[in-house]
C-alpha cells in the first residue's frame, strides 16, 4: 500500500504534465502522423516524459505500460521537433533535458513483469486536444493487475481539476492547487434526469446504439454531455454525471488499458461501478488491450445491473 507521501510526487508530475499540455494547446499544435493509429503530438511525448521521469526517480523498479514509444519519437519526429520536446520538458522541470533523456524516459519500465505497474496515457483524447476541446492526463497504478490507484489531470474540467484515488478514497483538487475534497458518485436513479457522458468522436462511440440503450433502460430524456478522454470518468466520480457507455462502432475493437486503468481506480474509490457489457470486471492482466472485455459501462452503481442486462440485449 502506498502512503500519501509516496504518492504525492506522482500527483505533482501529473500537474506538471498538464501545464506542458496547456502551454502547447494554447499555441498552434502540429500533429505527427502515426500511420493507421490515433494522432500524436509533441505534447503527448512531453507529457509522458514528465510522468516517466518522476517514475525513474520515485519508483525506479516498477513496470510501466505507456502509450507512446521512444522508437517512434526517434523515427517519426524530425530533429527540430525532438529538440522542441526536450526544451519544453526542460522548462517544465526547470532542468537541462536532452532528446536522449526523452527517449530513455519514454521507454522506462516497459516490458517489465512486476507486482506494481503504472499505466500511462499522456494525453487521452488527443483528437479533442487538437480540436481545442477536453483531454486527460491519465496515470493508473495496477497492483497484481488490479487498478488500486489513479490520477486524472483534467485541464478542461471546471477551472482545471486533478481527480485521484488512493487507498480506497477518491479526491478532487484544482490543478492550480488548494485543499483536496473527498468525492463520491451521485445518488441519481434512471427515473430522475440521468446525466450521461459519451465520447465526442463518432469513430470511438456508436452513439445510436447508446441512445437505444438509454431508451430501453428507461433513461428518459437524458442530459447528454459529449467530452473527450477520461474526463468522463472524473465527472462520474465527482457526482457530476451518472453513466458513461463506451461502445465502439467497430465490433471487434478492444479497448486499450491506458484508456481505463486510472479511471477505474477513481470510480471504484468514489463508490461507482465499472464493468464490460456482460457485467464482468475489466481484466487488466492481458497486456496493452482489454482482450477479455467488450464495451465498457461506467455508472454511479444505482442501476448498473439493469443497464448491463439492457446493453446485452441491444448489442448483438
Ligand atoms: P475518447 O476521447 O473517449 O473518444 O477516447 C479516446 C480514445 O479512443 C483514444 O485514446 C483511443 O485509444 C481510443 N480509440 C481509438 N480508436 C477507437 C475505436 N475505434 N473505438 C473506440 N475507441 C477508440
Ligand atoms: Mg487514450
Image (spheres, rainbow, N blue to C red):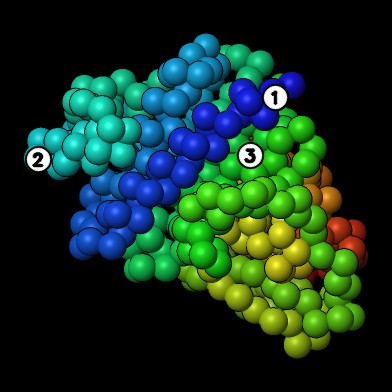
Q: CA distance from mark 3 to mark 1?
A: 13 Å
Q: Sort mark 1 into few (<14), some (14-19) or many (20+) by Cα contacts within 10 Å.
A: few
Query: Is 112 positioned to the left or the right of 209 in the image?
Result: left
For the residue pair 25 and 95, the one nearer the viewer reads as 95
Q: CA distance from mark 2 to mark 3?
A: 34 Å
Q: Most extreme residue toward the front, as rendered?
A: 178
Identify residue for label 1.
3
Residues at marks 1 and 2 touching, judged by CB atoms closer than 8 Å: no
Closer to the camera, 38 or 316? 38
* Element type at mark 2: helix
Residue drawn at point x = 36 percent, y = 68 percent: 132
The Cα–Cα distance between marks 1 and 2, rounded to whole angstroms, is 41 Å
Q: Position of residue 292 (x, y in %)?
A: 69, 39
Q: Picture quarter containing residue 191?
A: bottom right
- The residue that appears at 51% across and 65% down in the rendered structure is 159
* Residue assigned mark 2: 80
Q: Label 3, on which residue?
A: 150
Labels 3 and 1: the sequence-earlier one = 1
Q: Residue furthest bottom?
A: 221
Q: Position of residue 148 (x, y in %)?
A: 72, 33
Q: Within the image, what quadrant is residue 164 found in? A: top right
Q: Is residue 107 above or below residue 81?
A: above
Horizontal side of 160 relative to 218 (left or right) equals left
Which of the two discs, 1 and 2, labels the residue nearer the N terminus? 1
Amino acid at each position: 500500500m502506498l502512503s500519501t507521501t509516496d504518492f504525492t510526487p506522482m500527483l505533482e508530475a501529473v500537474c506538471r504534465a498538464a501545464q506542458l499540455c496547456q502551454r502547447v494547446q494554447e499555441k498552434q499544435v502540429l500533429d505527427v502522423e502515426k500511420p493507421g493509429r490515433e494522432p500524436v503530438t509533441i505534447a503527448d511525448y512531453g507529457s509522458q516524459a514528465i510522468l516517466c521521469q518522476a517514475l525513474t526517480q520515485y519508483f525506479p523498479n516498477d513496470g510501466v505500460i505507456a502509450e507512446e514509444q521512444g522508437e517512434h519519437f526517434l523515427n517519426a519526429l524530425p530533429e527540430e521537433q525532438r529538440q522542441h520536446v526536450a526544451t519544453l520538458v526542460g522548462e517544465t522541470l526547470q532542468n537541462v533535458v536532452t532528446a536522449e533523456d526523452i527517449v530513455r524516459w519514454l521507454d522506462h519500465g516497459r516490458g517489465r513483469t512486476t507486482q506494481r505497474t503504472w499505466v500511462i496515457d499522456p494525453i487521452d483524447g488527443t483528437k479533442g486536444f487538437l480540436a481545442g476541446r477536453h483531454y486527460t492526463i491519465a496515470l493508473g497504478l495496477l497492483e497484481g493487475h488490479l487498478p488500486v490507484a489513479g490520477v486524472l489531470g483534467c485541464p478542461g474540467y471546471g477551472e482545471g481539476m486533478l481527480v485521484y484515488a488512493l487507498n480506497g478514497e477518491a479526491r478532487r483538487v484544482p490543478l492550480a492547487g488548494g485543499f483536496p475534497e473527498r468525492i463520491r458518485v451521485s445518488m441519481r436513479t434512471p427515473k430522475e434526469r440521468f446525466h450521461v457522458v459519451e465520447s465526442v468522436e463518432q469513430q470511438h462511440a456508436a452513439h445510436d446504439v447508446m441512445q437505444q440503450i438509454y431508451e430501453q433502460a428507461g433513461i428518459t430524456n437524458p442530459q447528454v454531455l459529449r467530452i473527450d478522454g477520461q474526463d468522463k470518468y472524473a465527472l462520474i466520480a465527482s457526482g457530476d454525471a451518472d453513466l458513461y457507455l463506451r461502445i465502439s462502432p467497430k465490433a471487434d475493437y478492444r479497448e486499450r488499458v491506458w484508456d481505463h486503468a486510472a479511471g477505474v481506480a477513481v470510480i471504484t474509490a468514489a463508490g461507482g461501478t465499472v464493468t464490460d457489457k456482460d457485467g464482468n470486471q475489466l481484466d487488466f492482466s492481458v497486456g496493452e488491450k482489454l482482450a477479455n472485455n467488450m464495451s465498457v459501462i461506467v455508472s454511479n452503481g444505482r442501476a448498473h445491473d439493469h443497464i448491463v442486462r439492457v446493453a446485452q440485449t441491444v448489442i448483438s
